[in-house]
Image (tube, rainbow, N blue to C red):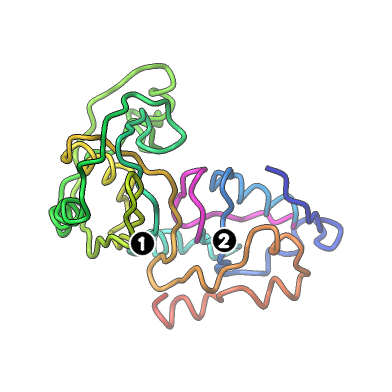
Amino acid sequence: MTIDGNRAQAFPHGSSDSLDGLLLVDKPSGFTSHDVVAKFRSTFRFKKVGHGGTLDPAATGLLVLLLGRGTKLSDRVMGGDKTYEGTMKLGVTTHTQDADGEILEERDASQVTRDMLEAEMRRLTGDIMQTPPMVSAIKQNGVPLYKLARKGVEVERAARLIHIYDFRLLDFETPCARLSVRCTKGTYVRTLCADIGEALGCGAHLESLRRTRSGSLSLNDALPLADILRLSREELRARLISMHDVISKGL
């Protein structure tokens, strides 16, 4: 999880806080969203840095960094709809509903067809109630659920209303299905995969995930984290989406 590019000498402590706005990062796998914020802050000696929407450590793709006064835009950025592409593996369930978890069960998925998969995806399109997984950052009495899960504690979670605008099967070759989903904030794609696997009787988990859009912001406009950490001050400024553009253009 090493990324070079320490430019601390070019950014004296506190000097870059005049850079206010949004920075689009292509997050690598293996980093938490907080890791990215911490790496950026330490490299550029930036005091105020946040992010607009958590990605799981294994997930890649669009992470919106909020710089300086841009941290005040957190609710605006986090509230936008999200688009993802990912791969679901049928026949294997894990305790985290993704590839990072311990395998709980393996079942035969050879009977699943493309038509069966697409039927389940249509069933999950529109307004649905989703129960968040135990391994998540949602807090129960101030404690993140994933910390309870590490201790083997499982608590009841209230189902939440989410909306799936579009759920599409891009490719299917047993046991793996590549999919895309456009959804409201707070949607757990790994839970969608687990629910599909359960409905099909074979189980499933999310093998990989990449966020491609957050609101009107696109991964196409993001730079890999390693490239961002090598930018000069003026190059960094040129990559910023200004406060004015965020507010005036409704980003």
Q: Is residue 154 visible?
A: yes
Which residue sits furthest top? Answer: 152
Main SS type for the magenta part? Answer: loop
Q: Residue at x 22, y 55 (%)?
A: 114
Q: Residue at x 47, y 75 (%)?
A: 246
Q: Residue at x 23, y 32 (%)?
A: 157
Residue 11, picture quadrant: bottom right
Q: Amino acid at mark 1?
A: Lys
Q: Position of residue 137 (x, y in %)?
A: 40, 38
Q: Residue 97 versus residue 200: which sits nearer the camera?
A: 200
Q: Residue 139 versus residue 5: which sits nearer the camera?
A: 5
Q: Secondary structure at mark 1?
A: strand
Circle on res. 82: 1
Circle on res. 26: 2
Establish if 161 lies above or below 73: above
Establish if 22 lies above or below 185: below
Which residue sits furthest right? Answer: 9
Q: Residue 98 versus residue 157: which sits nearer the camera?
A: 98
Residue 144, picture quadrant: top left
Q: Position of residue 128 (x, y in %)?
A: 15, 51
Q: Is residue 142 visible?
A: no
Q: Which residues are magenta?
A: 44-62
Q: Position of residue 168 (x, y in %)?
A: 27, 62
Q: Residue at x 56, y 55 (%)?
A: 27
Q: Position of residue 150 (x, y in %)?
A: 44, 21
* Residue 32 inside the magenta-drawn segment: no
